[in-house]
């Protein structure tokens, strides 16, 4: 005659199913419905009881669905009234021997974050040589003038026209803990940029006003009808006609003792000769 003695209560691990940001190794949930998976150390006699408590609110029972002998899933809701606060799961489970388990070895703590971050106060773009664009912004500040420390990342948007909303538009760049980027648009044209703050819970702040710049990487055409003559006083005089198409801002003149096929490495004899 033999028997099995089981005095060990079941334990549970809780894991986030959706991609959730973490802060101090605690998952942070924004407004909405979220799914978690529960893994038990052994098969249970009956469906376990899961409760979730935020702050000093009473525990709310979370419905469970069995997926496998030792695996369940649950859905819970985070509403906007929670603000920023900590939450804790409570479990009650019985194994086939009747042992009661209340220990969660992983994932018992979560954090709700339903407060949207503030808007970036200042943002500007500047055109740099060779069509490079520099975009800079300041951190977000709260209404009382203090720094909004909830920022986890910045989402940068780039369009060729001004939009009233970026809903449904994927960010052009996502930047962690930087206050600026460089951009190299491939084609000439007008580009508009905006940025918004996203906090650890995934809450999106307001979009900034659009800032625009015009990228022009195409060099002007060569001047026409270049002539060189020496005056009676020995001065060398150059004259030319403007190129076709876009009017230049100014000219640079070069001189060398051999035919010039490229100006690479040459210094201009006269720089920034005004266009007229």
Image (cartoon, rainbow, N blue to C red):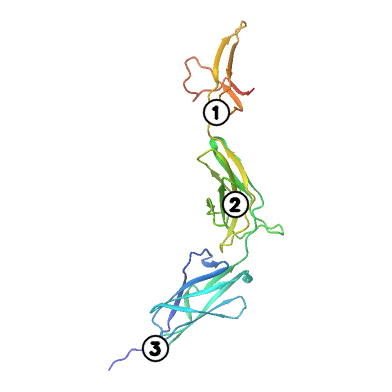
Residue wearing tag 3: 97
- Numbered tag placed on residue 12 in the rendering: none
In the picture of the structure, the residue carrying the numbered disc 2 is: 195
- Residue that badge 1 annotates: 220
Q: Residues within 10 Å of mark 1 (few under 14, many from 20)?
A: few
The residue under the point 52% across, 68% down is 26
Q: Is residue 51 left or right of residue 99?
A: right
The C terminus sits in image quarter: top right
Nearest the eye: 86 or 205: 205
The percent coordinates of residue 180 (x first, y second) are 58, 47
Foreground tag (3 vs 1): 1
Residue 108: x, y in percent?
51, 74
User: Label 2 vs label 3: CA separation?
Assistant: 58 Å
> Closest to the observer: 7 or 239?
239
From this view, report whether residue 19 is shown above or below residue 128.
below
Dot 3, how many residues are within 10 Å of its Cα: few (below 14), some (14-19), or many (20+)?
some
Q: CA distance from mark 3 to mark 1?
A: 86 Å
Q: Is residue 51 above or below residue 162?
A: below
Which residue is most to the bottom? 1
Give the mark, 3 or 1, whose residue is nearer the N terminus. Answer: 3
Q: Can you tell which quarter of the image residue 133 is in?
A: top right
Q: Label 1, label 2: how many angstroms apart (C-alpha)? A: 33 Å
Q: In the image, is residue 146 above or below residue 5?
A: above
Label 2: few (<14), some (14–19) or many (≥20) C-alpha neighbours in 10 Å: many
* Relative image position of residue 202 (x, y in whole percent): 56, 62
The answer to whether mark 2 and mark 3 are in CB contact below 8 A is no
Going 47% across and 16% down the picture, which residue do you hit? 259
The residue tagged with tag 3: helix, strand or loop?
A: loop
Q: Earlier in the sequence, mark 1 or mark 2?
A: 2
Q: Position of residue 223 (x, y in %)?
A: 55, 22
């Amino acid at each position: 005659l033999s028997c099995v003695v089981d005095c060990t209560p079941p334990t549970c691990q809780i894991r986030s199913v959706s991609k959730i940001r973490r802060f101090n190794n605690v998952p942070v949930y924004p407004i909405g419905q979220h799914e978690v998976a529960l893994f038990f150390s052994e098969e249970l006699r009956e469906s376990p009881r899961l409760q979730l408590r935020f702050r000093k609110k009473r525990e709310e029972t979370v419905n469970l669905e069995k997926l496998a002998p030792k695996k369940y899933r649950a859905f819970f809701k985070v509403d906007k009234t929670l603000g920023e606060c900590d939450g804790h799961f409570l479990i009650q489970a019985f194994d086939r021997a009747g042992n009661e388990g209340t220990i969660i070895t992983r994932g018992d703590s979560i954090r709700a974050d339903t407060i949207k971050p503030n808007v970036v106060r200042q943002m500007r773009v500047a055109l740099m040589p060779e069509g490079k664009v520099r975009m800079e912004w300041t951190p977000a500040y709260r209404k009382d003038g203090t720094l909004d420390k909830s920022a986890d990342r910045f989402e940068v948007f780039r369009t060729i026209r001004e939009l009233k909303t970026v809903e449904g538009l994927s960010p052009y760049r996502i930047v962690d803990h930087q206050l600026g980027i460089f951009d190299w648009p491939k084609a000439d044209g007008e580009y508009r940029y905006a940025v918004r703050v996203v906090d650890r819970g995934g809450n999106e702040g307001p979009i900034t006003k659009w800032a625009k710049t015009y990228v022009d990487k195409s060099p002007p055409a060569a001047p026409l009808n270049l002539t060189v003559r020496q005056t009676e006083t020995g001065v060398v005089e150059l004259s030319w006609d403007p190129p076709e198409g876009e009017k230049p801002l100014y000219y640079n003149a070069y001189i060398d003792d051999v035919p010039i096929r490229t100006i690479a490495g040459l210094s201009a004899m006269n720089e920034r000769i005004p266009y007229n």
